[in-house]
Amino acid sequence: MFNSSYQAKRGRIGLLLITPWLIGFLLLKLAPIIASFIFSLTDFNMLKPQDISFIGLQNYAVLVRDETMWSVLVGTIGLAVITVPLQLLFALLLAALLSNESIIGRNFYRTLIFLPSIIPGIAVFSVWFGFVDPTNGWLNQLIMEPLGLPPYPGPNSESGRNLLLILLSLWNIGPAFLILSGAMMGVPKELYEAARVDGAGPVYRLINITLPVISPAIFFSLLISLITVFGGSVLLDRNISFSSGFQSPVDWYIAEIMFGKQSLGYAAGIAWIMFILVIVIAIYLFKTADRWVFYPVD
Amino acid sequence: MLVVVIYLFPISYMALTAVKDEAQFGDPNAPVWPSRKIELEYEGEQYPLHIVPFEDGDRELLLVQPRRNESQFIDPKSPESGLIEWEGSWRTLEPVYENYFTFQAFTDWFEILDFRQVGYNTLVVVGLTEIGVVVVSVLVAYGFARFPIPYGNILFFILIGTIILPEKITLIPTYFAFINLFDWQGTWWPLIAPHFFGSAVLIFLLRQNFRTIPKELEEAALIDGAGPMRILFSVILPMAWPTVVTVALLHFFFIWNETRLASLYLLSAPDKHPLVSSMLARGGFISGANNLQARALITMVVPMTVLFLSQKFFMRGVQITGLEK
């Protein structure tokens, strides 16, 4: 019934349908990536665009000795190592708790968990900075003091800032929670029934049925949590302006160079380093995914 | 449930702080609850009420004459009995508070901001990008889900790759192009135009969903002679509409909260900012924790309402099964 010329025709229709994305990809993704690389080989500055000259790998040579660059890179990776697993575990835990059908109004609870993720960045920052403020805030007054815990030192100290970053990352789990919840609802009921008959407890069922079945969703959540740390914004916009580096130190540093000094060449160099880093991490993740992500047979 | 309460606890801080009187913030004795000092009139002047300890118990008295070592008070219940002397520093005394809510912080904002202009800006940016991104993403997702596109798998893998692309690498040249080549500073173009090429993550979510729709339904329509667009509208969309609405909502939450590009490209046009970024830009005009929290509340009330109205299917619309490579 479907001969090859018919298939070719359908192929052309499909190509036509994806054309807008394809053009967008070429103009807004591929061309800028190449342009960024070319910029990074020049001393291009927005303030004097006519004085552009080719300087080869000089930007990269400076970058290697740039101490700020190394510290923000280490800071970013450190942030990723702490917040990404924490976000994922927290989202997974909440999604698992709320997948129990006997909970009354669980859809409402799910909405409440998602709520912080739709609050604009400025509101989130106002709320948390106010909440943890050592003099007027509630954290010390209502939580730390009554529980006999040491007072929170305020967001300006090193440890205070890190703690705040961790708390803030827990308010960003919305997309991961949404994806994991959706995946858990899609797990076939028969699998649970069979396990129940065999006498499996809830923890056993979670580890041996739910997690393998939803592993593609876990993988996707992992990717989007990770990209947030590198200054991307997938499904969620939590940044206020380009100069607030609360989510990603390296992202902040690029913005500083780019908008503060207007030196696009050097900024493009850092962006390319970050780009390569993300690619390496992504390839590594996709490689390991072969071992723990289970793809259903189409 | 307890987890949810703890999780959302800071929101109650925001709500209560927004309705506090500004005088409460500098006052170390003030309670957590929104309140103010009770002041009563005595001989035409207002005086604050304090708790004053005496040997026979505490009394609530008006502080009329504060001095370092001894102060003079009036009993508001019997002002005719005259001044009462009390020895000790009046600063050690605790004032008496009453519950007090004020919407001053909100009315301040309505004076700072022209909400009609800002509302119009928000409507234009949100409305146009919403139309663009949803229509284009649905078409592209349909193409990827149902048609044998040459090198379709590779193209789709590239699409997933663009989801995890760091934003700065594309921002640097596009910033230069939009500002210097197109002269788009101070216009809505840089905020709106890119959305008319679809959004990779939304295309991905839609395509995953379209693929779960049984092909048999389509084949029946094909035999009846339906074209690709008829099939999209009469077979795919009626089945997939919860996901399409979810995707539209996700974009709405995203674009409502977007402030980075707005503050970058609308730097020279303060009257073109949508709501959230214009409130951000006017941060310098406000002071006080109550104004900050009122701002937070004003910016989040719309997305919050939308979320609660749509909660029935919002949480069902996103399902990721096989993420094939």
Image (spheres, coloured by chain):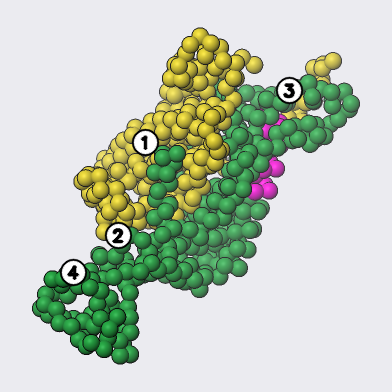
Chain colours: A yellow, B green
- For image coordinates 89% across by 27% down, the residue present is B225
The residue at which mark 2 appears reads as: A136
Residue A122 placement (x, y as % from top left): 44, 55
User: Label 4 lies in what chain?
Assistant: B
Query: Magenta residues, as a range?
Result: B130-145
Q: Is residue B197 visible?
A: no
Q: Nearer the viewer, residue B175 or A169?
A: A169
The residue at which mark 1 appears reads as: A83
Placement of the C terminus of chain B among the 4 image quadrants: top right
The residue at which mark 4 appears reads as: B57
* CA distance for labels 1 and 2: 27 Å
Q: Amino acid at mark 1?
A: Thr
The residue at which mark 3 appears reads as: B214
Residue B67 placement (x, y as % from top left): 15, 81
In the picture, residue B56 is in which quadrant?
bottom left
* Mark 1 residue element: helix
* CA distance for labels 1 and 3: 39 Å
Q: Are marks 1 and 2 in contact (CB under 8 Å)?
A: no
Placement of the N terminus of chain B among the 4 image quadrants: top left
Q: Residue furthest bottom?
A: B43
Relative to A185, does residue A271 appear above or below in the rendering?
A: below
